[in-house]
Structures are given as structure tokens and as C-alpha cells.
Image (cartoon, rainbow, N blue to C red):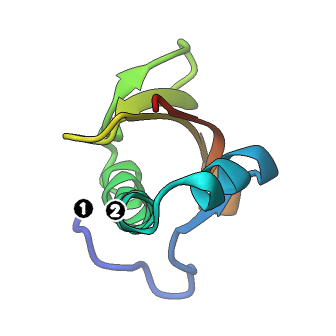
């Protein structure tokens, strides 16, 4: 398999739940931009990994291959995300900012 989009299938999306979104709005602008860019890159990387039959990045948090945790390198931010395969979505229900 390749990392190329599959004909007839939409790409992966990243969905941030309300509370993580409001945490990002409370961050200094430069940190918020870094976290946003990180989440966009995560969507690309995790989606490509799943499409290729590999594990997405981060530490597995369950035995089902749905929940993962990951820290934003060099920043005081940890995220938990869920891979919703049937919707081709990376969902961010938890974002912790240590300030």
C-alpha cells in the first residue's frame, strides 16, 4: 500500500472537541499556532499510517487501536486522540497544557 489518497475516498480530517479548542484559545498565540500545526501534521501522519496498515504515532491507550496519547515535542502540551476509521477522522478529545 502507498501513502497516496485512495480514489473515491476522502482524506482524513482532524476534529478538536470543544474543551481542547478552548484550551488552545487560552494559549499564547505562538504556542497555539505550533499546536495547530502539530495537529494538522498529526492528521496527515496518522491517516497515512492507518491507510498503510501501520500503527499511528503515539502511545496506545487501549487494545482496540483507537486511543493514543502524544506529547507535542518541546512544548508543555499533551494530547489524546482517537482514530475513527469509518469516518476517516482524527478526533482530539483531550489536550493538556502545563503552564
Q: In which quadrant of the rendered image does the N terminus lie?
A: bottom left
Report helix, strand or loop for mark 2.
Answer: helix
Q: How many marks?
A: 2
Vertical arrangement, residue 66 with respect to residue 21, above or below: above
> Which comes before the other along the chain, label 2 or label 1?
1
For residue 18, say whether it is visible: yes
In which image quadrant can residue 73 be found? top left
Vertical arrangement, residue 70 with respect to residue 11, above or below: above
Is there CB contact under 8 Å for labels 2 and 1?
no
Image position of 29 (left or right of 26): left
Residue at the spot of label 1: 1
- Please state the horizontal and vertical placement of residue 15, each as a whole percent of the image: 66, 60
For residue 90, say whether it is visible: no
- Numbered circle sitting on residue 65: none
Image position of 74 (left or right of 56): left
Q: Closer to the observer: label 2 or label 1?
A: 2
Residue furthest to the bottom = 8
Report helix, strand or loop for mark 1.
Answer: loop
- Numbered circle sitting on residue 34: 2
In which image quadrant can residue 58 be found? top left
- Please state the horizontal and vertical placement of residue 17, each as a whole percent of the image: 75, 51
Closer to the camera, 21 or 63?
A: 21
Q: Crowdedness of circle 2 by 10 Å Cα count: few (<14), some, many (20+)?
A: few
Residue beneath the point at 64% across and 48% down: 23
Closer to the camera, 30 or 53?
A: 30
Closer to the camera, 84 or 5?
A: 84
Query: How much space separates mark 2 and mark 1, taking CA atoms?
Result: 31 Å
Residue beneath the point at 56% across and 87% down: 8
Residue beneath the point at 51% across and 16% down: 61
Vertical arrangement, residue 28 with respect to residue 64, above or below: below
Residue beneath the point at 70% across and 60% down: 87
Amino acid at each position: 500500500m502507498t501513502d497516496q489518497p485512495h480514489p473515491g475516498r476522502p482524506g482524513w480530517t482532524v476534529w478538536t472537541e470543544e474543551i481542547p479548542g478552548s484550551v488552545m484559545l487560552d494559549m499564547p498565540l505562538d504556542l497555539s499556532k505550533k499546536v495547530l500545526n502539530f495537529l494538522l501534521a498529526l492528521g496527515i501522519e496518522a491517516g497515512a499510517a492507518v491507510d498503510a496498515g501501520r500503527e499511528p504515532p503515539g502511545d496506545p491507550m487501549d487494545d482496540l487501536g483507537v486511543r493514543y496519547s502524544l506529547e507535542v515535542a518541546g512544548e508543555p502540551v499533551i494530547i489524546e486522540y482517537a482514530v475513527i476509521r469509518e469516518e476517516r477522522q482524527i478526533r482530539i478529545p483531550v489536550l493538556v497544557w502545563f503552564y
